[in-house]
Image: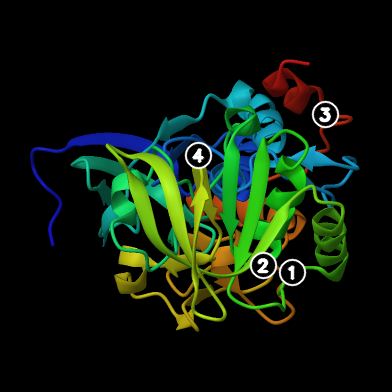
Amino acid sequence: MLPSEKAKTTKTDVVIIGAGPVGLFAVFELGLLDLECHLIDILDRAGGQCAELYPEKPIYDIPAWPVISGHNLTERLLEQIAPFDPQFHYNRMVTMLEKQDDGSFIVETDENEKFHCAVIVIAAGGGSFQPKRPPVPGIEEFEKHSVFYSIRRIEEFRDLDLLIAGGGDSALDWTLNLQPLAKSITLVHRREEFRGAPDSVKKMRALVEAGKINLQIGQITDLQGNCGVLEKVSIKDKEGGLNELKVDRILPFFGLTMKLGPVANWGLNLHENLIAVDTEKFATSEPGIFAIGDINTYPGKLKLILSGFHEAALMAQAAKKHISPDERIIFQYTTSSTKLQKKLGV
């Protein structure tokens, strides 16, 4: 498909697809090398899965931060890259990629925007993602009003009767985190065994034993309410009986459906729906296109944010060489380079 002639074209050095933590840190590394970045993301804000799925959930393996939330990590990264003035384009999906005769690229979004760039960095996590919807008739009516698949502001659930559905880490973690402020919490899972961390399961069962939360083994079968406002939920227990429960909000945590979307049609080498890269430059099979973070794969790959930060640093050096092959690139440290410190405003 040829790009639309009516679409406005924005010229830039780099287009980053994905504004999660790894994509944001890539802006920093590229900015140190004087490369301008535009970021495109399908979500309505920066932060990727950290912002969408667990903005207030603690993260423990970011260097120098014994504990930091997904929201705060995103805010610190945005603060760090502010000197480079990156441009963000939210609520958009890249629909077309066309290589030009000179090796550059035209990128087009579903908002009829065009970007002309020398390098593309795919930092889209596992691709575009959406939560798995429980098989409950009419649940769509209550979504975004009484049914939520992620928690952005924990205070919005204070003093409410909550039903949390699921048996994995997300369901257990939010049961533990919301218990101190909710009016009541009922955890619903279809069987006695849980898939989450053993320590979380132990803590959850202790709260049940103390009468601080309710545990029901069964499945949600029916929702009752009007205009998206939930009133009651029917739960079918393991014996087949039906129980009605007064509920203000439902939080289903049944995992995510990940899709590469149009990326799968860009002619890149894929392995089990991930993009194969080298470990020197994190380059894909297409010169000028790099992939960093959870969306790439290579021997020994670890799906950690800190690993993505390392990948971003090496990718940036390779991207600079791709854009300016004849320029001598001198590696500098931010701690000692007055040139880099000037760029950072320090």
Amino acid type, callout 4: Asp
Q: Is residue 330 above or below residue 8?
A: below
Amino acid type, callout 1: Gly
Give the residue pinned by disc 2.
168
> Residue 229: which numbered mark, if any?
none
Give the residue pinned by disc 4.
248
- Side of 322 where 302 appears, left or right: right
Give the residue pinned by disc 3.
337
CA neighbours of label 4 inside 10 A, class few (<14), some (14 to 19), many (20+): many
Q: Who is closer to the viewer here, 91 or 278? A: 91
Query: Who comes first in sequence, dot 2 or dot 1?
Result: 2
- Side of 35 where 75 appears, left or right: right
Query: Who comes first in sequence, dot 3 or dot 4?
Result: 4
Query: Who comes first in sequence, dot 2 or dot 3?
Result: 2
In which quadrant is the N terminus drawn? bottom left
Give the residue pinned by disc 1.
196
Q: Label 4's element?
A: loop
The residue under the point 42% across, 70% down is 286
Q: Label 1's element?
A: loop
The residue under the point 74% across, 24% down is 339
Label pair 3/4, CB-CB below 8 angstroms = no
Residue 292 pos. (x, y %): 59, 60
In which quadrant is the C terminus drawn? top right
Query: Who comes first in sequence, dot 1 or dot 4?
Result: 1
The residue under the point 68% across, 36% down is 182
Label pair 2/1, CB-CB below 8 angstroms = yes
CA neighbours of label 2 inside 10 A, class few (<14), some (14 to 19), many (20+): some
Q: Who is closer to the viewer here, 64 or 228? A: 228
Residue 274 pos. (x, y %): 51, 75
Looking at the image, how many numbered discs can be counted on the residues? 4
Residue 262 pos. (x, y %): 31, 65
